[in-house]
Image: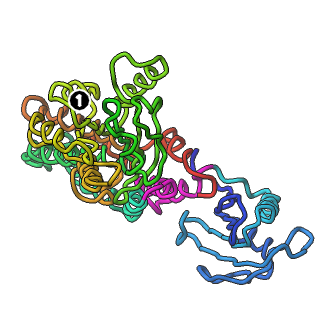
Amino acid sequence: MTSDSATIVALATAPAAGAVGILRLSGPAALDVGRRLAPGVPVSPTPRHAYLASFVDAAGAVLDEGLFLYFQAPRSFTGEDVVELQAHGSPRLLRLLLARALEDERVRPALPGEFTRRAFLNGRIDLTRAEAVADLVAADSEAAVRAAAAGLSGALAERIRALETPLRELHADLEGVLNFPDEAEGADAEAGPRVTALRSVAEALRAEVGRGRLVRQGARVALYGPVNAGKSTLFNRLVGEARALVDDEPGTTRDALEARVEWDGLGVTLYDTAGLREAPGRVEALGIARTRELLAAVDLAVLVLPPETSREEAASWTRDAGATPVLAVIGKCDVMPEAQDTVAATLPSPAPPRVSGLTGEGVEALRTSVLTRLWGGGTPSAVALVSERHADALRRTAEALGRAEAASRVSTLEVLSGEVGLALEALGEVSGTSVSEALLDTLFQRFCIGK
């Protein structure tokens, strides 16, 4: 769907009781329709000025008193005339105002994300900023909020532009040599090194995909290991409350428990899993099978070793995690310290850190180690929020530049220019310079109505 001439309307606040509720209109009839709901506002209101106004029904009866704001095109979020009515947050009142606005045949309900979509189509924001709006609304951790805010201010757009601009210039030079060889002679002389440099930039952006997913969705960390290693006690300590049952009897945990925490701004979902052992009972065996399934899906597995473990046992339990990265710790450091000295001596250097869920010893160090393994240093909020969609576009950009790099040595200028063009087209899917209507439909469907 492309931008049309209809004026759209939607509630810009959640449909729940609150102090303030906002009705938003955008389009050529926004001011006229807004004034019908607030007839006391001047015919030509001052843009960006808040008017105290009475909101009325079709018979002229006052429904509420609130603020009327007018944003004149093109200096508005959507690039169109925008009117906002800020009323008291009664869901019934807001539905009455919405129905009143929809009585005008020039007005229709806004689709999900349509205000932001119009802002993109009217050149007010690029596609990375538009997506950052949805990321900010959905953010459920400090890192996600800060990263989305950085994207909204243009952090990712700037990095994409730093790749797209020289790539476009290179493509123009190559096409110039092909179409006007006399006038553009020599413009392709440094094409090979230019392609190599641009490919490095694309690969650097691709490297942030994992970080972007961690910030958007949060990290998943599972505590696992043999029975009676102290996993549930450690889980409760990390979560900050008694979520898991703890008992001296082995095999207490029969199913995976999960809890959401936030460490240094990064959202982390912790899992406490059924202990691994030979010949478990039938129900416990189901829990162990679920543990192995979960280990394949998490970002990091924390192997909690009992004090009496051996090198061979530790190696076997490490293999249970498959391809998932493993961080090993020695549990129950509050008991059997002499046994832990033996464990530390038999395990590879450096020895795993010691923790106690009962006393809290080593728990802060474990949190730091988990974040380091997940993040690798720096602050989560520094990420540019590269999404999986961006990752696919950047992968195709880098692959096309890789083929272009090879073509610069062994193939024709036509092939080289064609591959650079493909890279530019793929990159344009991130910035929005080359994007289909179908892709826009998919992207903006995840927005809430009114945004």
Quadrant for residue 18, please give it.
bottom right
Q: Can you give x and y, in whole percent of width and height, for residue 365 in the image?
A: 24, 54
| Crowdedness near tag 1: few (<14), some (14–19) or many (≥20) residues, C-alpha within 10 Å | many
Position of residue 431 relative to residue 313, above or below, is: below
For disc 1, the marked residue is 318
Q: Nearer the viewer, residue 339 or 116?
A: 339
| Left or right of 250 in this view: 411 | left
Quadrant where the N terminus is found in the figure: top right
Residue at coordinates 26% horizontally, 44% vertically from top-left?
Answer: 335
The answer to whether residue 114 is magenta is yes
Q: Nearer the viewer, residue 358 or 6?
A: 358
Residue at coordinates 35% horizontally, 41% vertically from top-left?
Answer: 221
Quadrant for residue 309, please give it.
top left
- For the stretch drawn in magenta, the main secondary structure is helix
Residue 429 seen in render: no
Q: Nearer the viewer, residue 210 or 334?
A: 334
Q: Give the extent of the magenta segment.
A: 112-141
Disc 1, SS = helix
Residue at coordinates 59% horizontally, 73% vertically from top-left?
Answer: 72
Position of residue 337 relative to residue 228, above or below, is: below
Quadrant where the C terminus is found in the figure: bottom right
The answer to whether residue 405 is magenta is no
Position of residue 142 relative to residue 376, above or below, is: below
Name which residue type carries label 1: Thr
Residue 274 seen in render: yes
Q: How is the image coloured?
A: rainbow
Q: Can you give x and y, in whole percent of width and height, for residue 68 in the image?
A: 69, 77
